[in-house]
Amino acid sequence: MHVSIQTPPEHTTYAALLDIWQAADELGFTGAYTFDHMVPLNDGPSGPDPDGIPAGPQLEGWMALAALASHTARLEVGTLVTGVTYRHPSVLAKMAVTLDRITDGRAVLGIGAAWHQAEHERYGIAYPEVGERMERLDEALQVFRLLCAAGADGGRADFDGRWYSLDDAPFDPGPVRPGGIPVLVGGSGPRLLRLVARRADRYNGFWAPWEWGDVNARLDDLLAGRDRTPGSLQRTAFVFGELSGDATAEAALVAHFARQRGGTDDEVRSRVLVGSPDHMVEVLRSFADAGVDGVIVNLRSPVDLGGLERFAREVLPAVAGPAPA
């Protein structure tokens, strides 16, 4: 399987993130991702605000992504994931292709239906009901494909949707790779899985290893209904990790996960990356056995560079496979 990282640009500095990304670039990880939010998602040293939104610094995900990506040579790069509500899809397409050009064809468009209602309300960003958000995501992906295709062949794009439209829209330059920029859709729920089968090249989910079998079976059925083979959709698992080897930090991550998503201590430890290298290999192999092509490891600040190097040295060789096509 292939292994990437996600470094939320919260409670940290650009310099610290750059150290992590350049190390990951040299250590053999497949990709690196930011997230796309206006506020932190996790509590910082000062704890949560009284209203439940964590206090602390948060860098803008796409600006940080472009800067970090420009200092790497081989990592795939993207956001995990961009909420469709934050930007018009034409603007997002231009951003993604610009990133692809900056990195000589290493961009991934990570996108989802958006979920952080409080964040939207604080910044005056419209937060429609889930049905409309899913419709917007579906149309946004159509707009993205049409614009990228226009950029590839020197043409123009037209689209007349319910939420978005294009009218003889030029788009130059196009993506670097002939196949375009891979589209990764993240999230859960029946409607999203149907959209994944319809529009995505990759799917990223939060499922535990013992849940992925059913999820993959549903995806395979949906793909067959679209005349797609199971292999046409890459599947990645979003996995939380604490690589420092520090027992206190590991216990804090396990407790945080249990509060957010439930599960006993043993259940959580069987799906997150903590403990010995052998245990991490066991967890990763359980995802691979469930039919997952790769994992994206969430690393919360501060990230221990020594732990990242130890993981690359002692865990990656035991599980690493080819990068996604």
Image: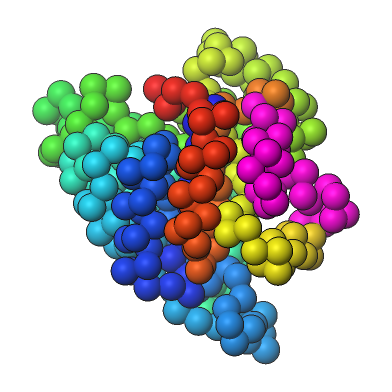
Residue visible at 55% across and 32% down in the picture: 294
Q: Quadrant of residue 251?
A: bottom right
Image quadrant holding the N terminus, namely top right
Foreground of the two, 84 or 203: 203
Please state the horizontal and vertical placement of residue 267, each as a whole percent of the image: 83, 47
Residue visible at 78% across and 51% down in the picture: 268
Work out whether residue 199 can be spotted.
Answer: no
Q: Quadrant of residue 179?
A: top left
Please state the horizontal and vertical placement of residue 68, each as a whole percent of the image: 29, 56
Foreground of the two, 303 or 41: 303
Foreground of the two, 66 or 163: 66
Work out whether residue 234 can be spotted.
Answer: yes
Question: Which color scheme does this rendered protein use?
Answer: rainbow
Residue, far right: 264
Residue visible at 44% across and 23% down in the picture: 322
Q: Is residue 24 above or below residue 57?
A: above
What secondary structure characterizes most of the magenta part? helix
Q: Is residue 265 magenta?
A: yes
Residue visible at 50% across and 68% down in the picture: 302
Magenta segment, which residues?
260-288
Please state the horizontal and vertical placement of residue 110, each as a whole percent of the image: 44, 44
Please state the horizontal and vertical placement of residue 4, each as a whole percent of the image: 47, 41
Left or right of 179, for residue 45: right
